[in-house]
Amino acid sequence: MPDNPPPPSGAATRAPALARLRQQVSDLHRELVRYRLVVWTAGNVSARVPEADLFVIKPSGVDYDRLTPDSMIVCDLAGAVVEGDLSPSSDTAAHAYVYRHMPQVGGVVHTHSTYACAWAARAEPVPCVLTAMADEFGAEIPIGPFALIGDDSIGRGIVDTLKGHRSPAVLMRSHGVFTIGKDARAAVKAAVMCEDVARTVHISRQLGEPQPIAREDVDRLYDRYQNVYGQQPAPSADRGA
Ligand SMILES: [Zn+2]
């Protein structure tokens, strides 16, 4: 044994974080089922591996109740498999494109959830007509371009639509929802909220024309929810509950 063993490699120091992310990504797929955002094997969650040009994503075509941490696939940012015995999700190239072009994004989710897809099929953005929508999305939920799977066009459509937009969700035309977040859990939350507001605004439409919220009120709601709402690490005296 040498007196001074070499420092651990990047892979060795990354191992605990990677194990946590495999578990988290596997668990978050169950949330897609619990909130009824997916049928059969459609839909997927991925998470960026911090300080590595890698992300964790589900394997393609495996039943949700058979997903395990060990069956998750690790890919590089070109979408090539680095660890895993199965093929990665067929949407891997789109996730990889987002991670390459949006460095602040730590998680990506894709679903074909019903009400959101109903808006996507009409190529109509969901208007910001509810305070919960202003909180989470800060604007309408936008429509992205029609794009076929097989190259970078879905990823490019997601990034081109969401860059410079507050919304963490895009409705890809005639296809479905892609959401982003600071981590995978935030992206799943955005997917859940996207379906919820798409449903409510759709129902409102059956009764008449939903009323828009003034832009300055949307701004105030968004700012408060993003910066004040919830459990703060160091609450200050002048901020309410
Ligand atoms: Zn899809």
Image (cartoon, rainbow, N blue to C red):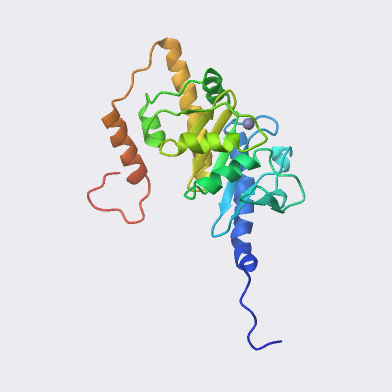
Residue 28 shows in the view = no
Name the quarter showing ligand 1: top right
Image spot of residue 106 (x, y percent): 52, 49
* Viewport quadrant of the N terminus: bottom right
> Toward which corner of the image does residue 240 lie, by quadrant?
top left
* Viewport quadrant of the C terminus: top left
User: Seen from this angle, which residue lies furthest left?
Assistant: 238
Rendered residue at 56%/20% (across/down): 121
Image spot of residue 198 (x, y percent): 48, 24
Viewed as shown, does residue 215 lie left or right of 65? left
Residue 44 shows in the view = yes
Viewed as shown, does residue 217 lie left or right of 163? left
The correct choice, above or below, for 93 with respect to 218 in the image is below
Judging depth in this view, the residue of 1 and 100 nearest the camera is 100
Judging depth in this view, the residue of 55 and 228 nearest the camera is 55
Rendered residue at 30%/35% (across/down): 219
Rendered residue at 36%/32% (across/down): 134
Q: How many marks?
A: 0
Image spot of residue 13 (x, y percent): 60, 67
Rendered residue at 53%/27% (across/down): 145
Image spot of residue 151 (x, y percent): 65, 37
User: Seen from this angle, which residue lies furthest bottom?
Assistant: 3
Judging depth in this view, the residue of 21 and 233 nearest the camera is 21
